[in-house]
């Protein structure tokens, strides 16, 4: 059996068991495998997707260029999108868009017959990550405008965030303290014990960031 035949024969079992949304297409972009996780992510039934062009899962702009890219790749074999994680906007059945990371792997038969090439796409929903990032941006904004001095440190006491209010209270700029141990802001009697306190605290807890 060729590598392609082996992969194809096992694809249904492997991809359906995978919690990761997996989509297999042929060299023309037609979907040949659409696993259960992909069904859940895109809210389609398998039979609604298999046999259709994968561009149905893309925004209109990406779909417009997808077939053109496949044809171009078949000619020049330049992997602009293959074997590289790409962030894109995907489309669910109801037309709502959501951010995803896609990694595409090419499966070429050992015979070298490129007409039988398949593409295996692994899809990750970035919605939660995007929300966390936006929340972090909000937190940064709050930290920059609040009148309460805010200092965020790592489990080892290294300063990661130093608000404008903290700059005013301690007389240091953020650039002067970020990356340094927070003990620099303490009286010598306290700073000498601080690292030991953190070590004992994190020996009992799993929290990786605290505030001073």
Image (spheres, grey):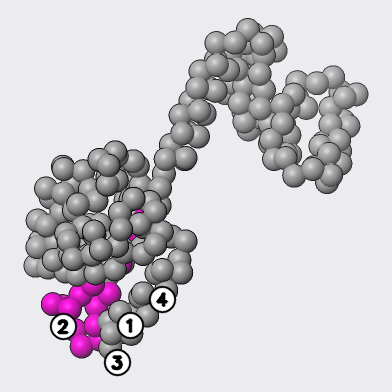
**Looking at the image, residue 54 lies above or below residue 115:** above
Residue 201: quarter of image: top right
Q: Disc 3 or 2, which lies upstream in sequence?
A: 3
Residue 166 in sight from this viewpoint: yes
In the displayed orientation, state which residue is furthest to the bottom. Answer: 1
Magenta residues (range)? 107-123
Q: Which quadrant of the figure has residue 96?
A: top left
N-terminal label among 4 and 2: 4
**Is there CB contact under 8 Å for labels 3 and 2?**
no
Q: Is residue 164 left or right of residue 36?
A: right
| The residue positioned farthest toward the right in the image shown | 189
Is 33 displayed left or right of 203 in the figure? left
Residue situated in front as seen by the camera: 46 or 174: 46
Magenta span includes 86:
no
Residue bearing mark 2 = 113
Can you tell which quarter of the image residue 47 is in? bottom left
Name the residue tied to disc 1.
Answer: 9
On residue 13, the disc is 4
């Amino acid at each position: 059996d060729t590598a392609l035949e082996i992969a194809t024969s096992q694809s249904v079992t492997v991809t359906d068991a995978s919690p990761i949304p997996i989509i297999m297409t042929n060299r023309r972009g037609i979907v040949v495998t659409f696993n259960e996780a992909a069904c859940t992510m895109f809210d389609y039934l398998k039979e609604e997707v298999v046999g259709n062009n994968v561009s149905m899962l893309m925004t209109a702009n990406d779909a417009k260029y997808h077939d053109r890219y496949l044809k171009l790749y078949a000619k020049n074999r330049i992997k602009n999108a293959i074997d590289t994680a790409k962030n894109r906007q995907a489309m669910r059945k109801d037309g709502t868009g959501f951010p995803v990371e896609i990694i595409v792997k090419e499966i070429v038969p050992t015979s070298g017959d490129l007409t039988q090439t398949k593409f295996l796409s692994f899809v990750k929903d970035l919605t939660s990550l995007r929300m966390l990032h936006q929340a972090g941006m909000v937190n940064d904004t709050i930290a920059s405008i609040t009148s309460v001095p805010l200092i965020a440190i790592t489990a080892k006491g290294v300063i990661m965030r130093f608000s404008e209010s903290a700059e005013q209270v301690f007389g240091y700029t953020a650039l002067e303290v970020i990356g340094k141990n927070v003990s620099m802001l303490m009286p010598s009697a306290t700073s000498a014990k601080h690292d030991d306190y953190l070590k004992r605290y994190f020996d009992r807890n799993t929290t990786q960031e605290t505030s001073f």
